[in-house]
Amino acid sequence: MLTGKQKRFLRAKAHHMDPIFQVGKGGVNENMIKQIAEALEARELFKISVLQNCEEDKTVVAEQLAEGAGAEIVQIIGNTIVLYKESVENKQITLPK
């Protein structure tokens, strides 16, 4: 689990990022979870945009994605979800203690 301090640090890092995934009408599926897990391994931290035509609640979407990809939800703000997962091969972010 991330501490409050670590979440603040990650929120600051994610602030200037643009979402690289979008969840739309189809909701969350296996293929999307697989792609997100791969992208997390490469980048560790990114944003996902929940489109207005998505039928599921953004909190549910965030939980499904985080659980499926083994990631942490850093924050849900508006229709944007920020996810973090420490990379095995590609570690770039050093979290504060």
Image: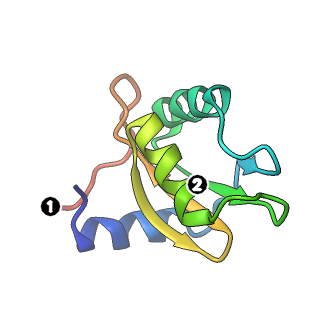
Dot 1: within a 10 Å radius of its alpha carbon, few (fewer than 14), some, or many (20 or more) residues? few
Whole-percent x, y for residue 6 in the image? 28, 65
Q: Which mark is residue 15?
A: none
Which SS class for mark 1? loop
Name the kind of residue labelled 2 in the image: Val
Residue at position x 41%, y 28% from top?
90
Q: Which residue is mark 1?
A: 97
Residue at position x 52%, y 39% from top?
43
Mark nearer the viewer, 2 or 1: 2
Q: Nearer the viewer, residue 89 or 23?
A: 23
Whole-percent x, y for residue 86 in the image? 34, 40
Residue that lies at the very extreme toward the bottom in this rendered image: 78
Q: Earlier along the polypeptide chain: callout 2 or callout 1?
A: 2
Whole-percent x, y for residue 57 in the image? 63, 65
Name the kind of residue labelled 1 in the image: Lys
Residue that lies at the very extreme toward the front in this rendered image: 55
Quadrant for residue 34, please give it: top right
Q: Are marks 2 and 1 in contact (CB under 8 Å)?
A: no
Image quarter (top left, top right, bottom left or bottom right) of the N terminus: bottom left
Q: Nearer the viewer, residue 78 or 56?
A: 56
Answer with left or right where residue 9 lies relative to residue 49. left
* Protein image colouring: rainbow
Q: Give the alpha-carbon distance from disc 2 to disc 1, as whole Å.
A: 29 Å
Which SS class for mark 2? helix
Residue at position x 47%, y 53% from top?
63
Image quarter (top left, top right, bottom left or bottom right) of the C terminus: bottom left
Q: Which residue is mark 2?
A: 61
